[in-house]
């Protein structure tokens, strides 16, 4: 873990830029009025540019604007099909008075006096949940959930003139939340599926196409649900965070198996949870922060915490005045960057916004994060072969076979052809033809020594015993002498010329060699005195040498 950027004196909500070319921008909507007293001075919207090449923790304000109300939630959309008109997308801010304001960040960066596009007030209370649809063709759809228990869908294909919002399940459906709506979340795989959570302990999954609720997830303990998050790659898995201090757990649901019994329950917090964020680059990682001043990184494969993000501010031993010192650095919001791997942003009650690089975190997991996986690789082989592989960038968690491609990388066509001809002749055992080809090529290139060498190899490969006289015990002498004499004699006369043979070989070639007789053992042989073995007493008395009997 490494602290990359820090924005002080900002109690705000945060939203990352979804535009790939502007992934270093974040939008901050302040939750405080900025005044010293109880007067409402409104809020402020700021866009900060994070320079990853700068070693300092400071950020640069790219644009800002004053607002009439304070922010309760914030969302940023890339506007997909309308990206040509809105190059930086649009920003939506949910206020504490139930108002939703829309801004153009491109105008904010240029300090345009009319950066705000529109404003509407669909809720009678604070807008707790706000999120744009992540699918490219539906990024103009905005979902909002308020403290009045209502959920609305806003079509912002024309942000300056928004249409009348509609509810996910109109009448005669009576399904609704009886408590305050805490969060809304669009499904990561299906564009018309929306989930909303409430303090009444229910999580409703809405089907906008069928205009009715698809299912309801309700905890048996009836604890309030503070936050929800869909699996970025699996549309039927969702995690709910319980905000009840009596049951501070994370529940993972698989909608294919059950909507009443969670697939897994994660326990690690001591008090209720406040925010969760599912890592989009590695779906096995989930970050959560709670009232117990803990920010925990979870491994969903093992269902256990593997790292706890430390508190940067020093905590007083006695808890400070009234026990408030123990809550210094408590984080109420956490969110992974959608475009930059391993980057996490947090907001804390001590009015700080911090950005961390989680690649340096010393986790207890034995697996490396998926953002460290090689996207591609290649290696060269013999014969100009190039083996390469590429990983599936769109869905890295899909269990699909990764193809390995083998291609020919030819730089010298003549060398490749000669290599293929050599392999063919060797497989056919046509050594004579190979030597003939090499000798002819050497003669065409006026390389006489090379030609003579290949002619000699041709003779050896065709008749191995032609150059060696019958019965010669010095074949290596004949071969070495013939090889040296080929420099001056034609290859056709190398076997008939006796001048190239050693003298001993010529003598052996004129007569038949007889095998040397084996020496016969001598009988009644008396060994010398110095080879006698120590004798026994009886042997010494007679003075005769005898063989000691075997035992």
Image (cartoon, grey):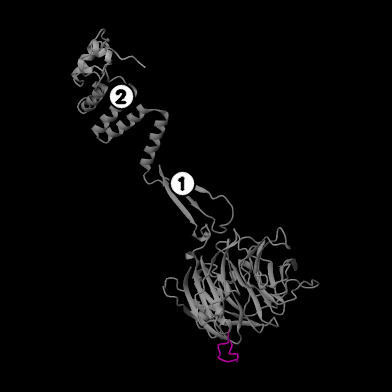
Residue positioned 28% across, 27% down in the render: 456
- Residue 457 vs 546, above or below: the answer is below
Residue 398 shown left or right of residue 205 in the figure: left
Residue count near mark 2 (Cα–Cα under 10 Å), binned few <14, some 14–19, many ≥20: many
Return the x and y of residue 90 as percentages of the image width and height.
58, 76
Quarter where residue 466 is shown: top left
Residue 348: in magenta span: no
Residue count near mark 1 (Cα–Cα under 10 Å), binned few <14, some 14–19, many ≥20: few
Residue hosting label 1: 407
Q: Earlier in the sequence, mark 2 or mark 1?
A: 1
Viewer-nearest residue: 185 or 316? 316
Quarter where residue 494 is shown: top left
What stretch of residues is rendered in magenta? 32-42
- Residue 40 in view in this figure: yes
Viewer-nearest residue: 495 or 442? 495
| Quadrant where the image shows the C terminus | top left
Residue 87 shown left or right of residue 473 in the figure: right
């Amino acid at each position: 873990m490494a602290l990359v950027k820090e924005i002080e004196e900002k109690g705000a909500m945060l939203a990352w830029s979804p535009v790939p070319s502007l992934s270093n921008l974040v939008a901050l909507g302040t939750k405080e009025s900025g005044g010293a007293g109880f007067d409402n001075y409104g809020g402020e919207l700021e866009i900060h540019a994070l320079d990853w090449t700068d070693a300092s923790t400071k950020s640069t304000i790219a644009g800002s604007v004053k607002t009439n109300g304070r922010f309760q939630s914030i969302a940023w959309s890339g506007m997909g099909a309308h990206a040509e008109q809105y190059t930086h997308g649009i920003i939506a801010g949910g206020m504490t008075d139930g108002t939703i304001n829309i801004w153009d960040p491109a105008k904010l960066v240029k300090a345009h006096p009319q950066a705000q596009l529109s404003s509407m007030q669909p809720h009678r209370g604070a807008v707790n949940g706000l999120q744009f649809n992540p699918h490219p063709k539906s990024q103009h759809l905005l979902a909002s959930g308020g403290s009045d228990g209502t959920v609305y869908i806003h079509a912002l294909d024309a942000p300056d003139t928004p249409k009348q919002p509609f509810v996910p399940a109109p009448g005669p459906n009576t399904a609704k939340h009886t408590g305050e709506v805490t969060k809304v979340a669009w499904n990561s795989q299906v564009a018309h599926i929306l989930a909303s959570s409430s303090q009444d302990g229910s999580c409703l999954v809405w089907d906008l196409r069928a205009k009715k609720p698809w299912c309801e997830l309700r905890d048996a303990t009836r604890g309030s649900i503070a936050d929800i998050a869909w699996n970025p790659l699996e549309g039927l898995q969702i995690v709910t965070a319980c905000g009840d201090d009596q049951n501070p757990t994370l529940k993972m649901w698989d909608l294919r198996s059950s909507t009443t019994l969670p697939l897994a329950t994660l326990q690690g917090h001591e008090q209720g949870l406040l925010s969760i964020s599912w890592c989009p680059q590695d779906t096995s990682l989930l970050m959560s922060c709670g009232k117990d001043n803990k920010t925990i990184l979870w491994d969903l494969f093992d269902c256990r915490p593997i790292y706890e993000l430390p508190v940067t501010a020093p905590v007083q031993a006695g808890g400070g005045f009234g026990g408030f010192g123990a809550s210094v650095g408590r984080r109420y919001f956490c969110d992974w960057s959608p475009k930059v791997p391993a980057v996490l942003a947090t907001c804390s009650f001590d009015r700080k916004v911090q950005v961390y690089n989680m690649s340096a975190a010393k986790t207890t997991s034995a697996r490396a994060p998926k953002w460290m996986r090689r996207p591609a690789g290649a290696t060269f082989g013999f014969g100009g072969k190039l083996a390469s592989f590429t990983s599936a960038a769109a869905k890295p968690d899909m269990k699909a076979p990764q193809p390995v491609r083998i291609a020919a990388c030819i730089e010298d066509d003549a060398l490749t052809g000669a290599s293929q001809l050599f392999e063919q002749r060797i497989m056919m055992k046509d050594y004579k033809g190979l030597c003939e080809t090499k000798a002819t090529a050497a003669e065409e290139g006026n390389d006489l020594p090379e030609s003579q060498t290949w002619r000699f190899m041709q003779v050896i490969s065709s008749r191995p015993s032609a150059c060696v006289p019958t019965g010669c015990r010095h074949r290596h002498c004949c071969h070495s002498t013939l090889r040296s004499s080929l420099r001056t004699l034609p290859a056709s006369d190398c076997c008939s010329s006796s001048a190239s043979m050693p003298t001993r070989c010529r003598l052996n070639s004129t007569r038949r060699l007889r095998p040397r007789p084996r020496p016969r053992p001598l009988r009644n042989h008396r060994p010398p005195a110095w080879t006698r073995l120590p004798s026994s007493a009886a042997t010494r008395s007679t003075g005769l040498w005898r063989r000691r009997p075997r035992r």
